[in-house]
């Protein structure tokens, strides 16, 4: 498979992951507005959203790549969370972007992408 085709497949999987993320975050915001969810439940739902979106992206990339699907899923999860962290750094001007909880979310997103690649 050519490099251009691999790049296109990865970009498509990332876009799908971010569309899932956007939809889920809108749903969380709506539920937060209607139900008055507390911060711990919202944080859990956001983390779950990231894991679910990276897993779906892992499935998409795994289906398009025929071999070493778990590595492609892992790479997708790393790119997914890396872009989110880069955007967070730009928005917050690099102030305290990653914490212990954030590090566990990073690891979970990477593992979620790898799991998606494996089950594809």
Image (cartoon, grey):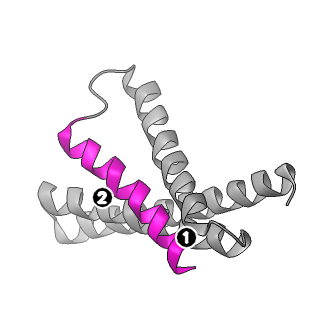
In x, y percent, where is residue 47?
30, 58
Identity of the residue drawn at 87% across and 55% down: 2
Taking the magenta stretch, the answer to whether it contains residue 29 is no
Decide: few, some or many residues near mark 2? Use Cα within 10 Å; few <14, some 14-19, many ≥20. Answer: some
Decide if residue 76 is on the left or right side of residue 52. Answer: right
Q: Quadrant of the C terminus?
A: bottom right
- The mark nearer the N terminus, 2 or 1, is 2
| Dominant secondary-structure state across the stretch colored magenta | helix
Number of numbered discs present?
Answer: 2
Say which quarter of the image contains residue 49: bottom left
- The quadrant the N terminus occupies is bottom right
Left or right of 22? Residue 34 is left
Q: Position of residue 59 (x, y in %)?
A: 57, 73
Residue 109 is covered by the magenta coloring: yes
- The quarter holding residue 115 reads bottom left
Secondary structure state at the residue bearing disc 1: helix
Q: Nearer the viewer, residue 17 or 105?
A: 105
| Residue under pointer 1 | 117
Residue lying at the far bottom in this picture: please name it: 119
Residue 51 vertical placement versus 93 (above, below): below
Q: Residue at x 13, y 57 (%)?
A: 40
Say what secondary structure mark 2 lies in: helix
- Residue drawn 43% across the image and 55% down it: 110
Q: Are marks 2 and 1 in contact (CB under 8 Å)?
A: no
Instruction: Write down the region rendered in magenta.
Output: 99-120
Q: Judge whether 21 appears above or below 3 on screen.
A: below
Q: Position of residue 91 (x, y in %)?
A: 43, 28
Alpha carbons under labels 2 and 1: distance apart: 19 Å
Disc 2: which residue: 47
Farthest front residue? 68
């Amino acid at each position: 498979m050519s490099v251009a085709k691999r790049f296109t497949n990865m970009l498509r999987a990332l876009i799908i992951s971010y569309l899932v993320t956007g939809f889920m975050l809108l749903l969380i915001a709506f539920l937060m507005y209607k139900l008055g969810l507390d911060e711990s439940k919202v944080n859990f739902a956001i983390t779950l959203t990231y894991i679910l979106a990276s897993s779906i992206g892992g499935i998409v990339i795994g289906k398009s790549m025929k071999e070493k699907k778990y590595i492609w899923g892992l790479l997708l999860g790393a790119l997914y969370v890396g872009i989110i962290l880069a955007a967070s750094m730009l928005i917050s001007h690099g102030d305290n972007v990653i914490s212990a909880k954030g590090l566990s979310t990073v690891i979970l997103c990477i593992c979620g992408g790898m799991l998606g690649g494996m089950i594809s």
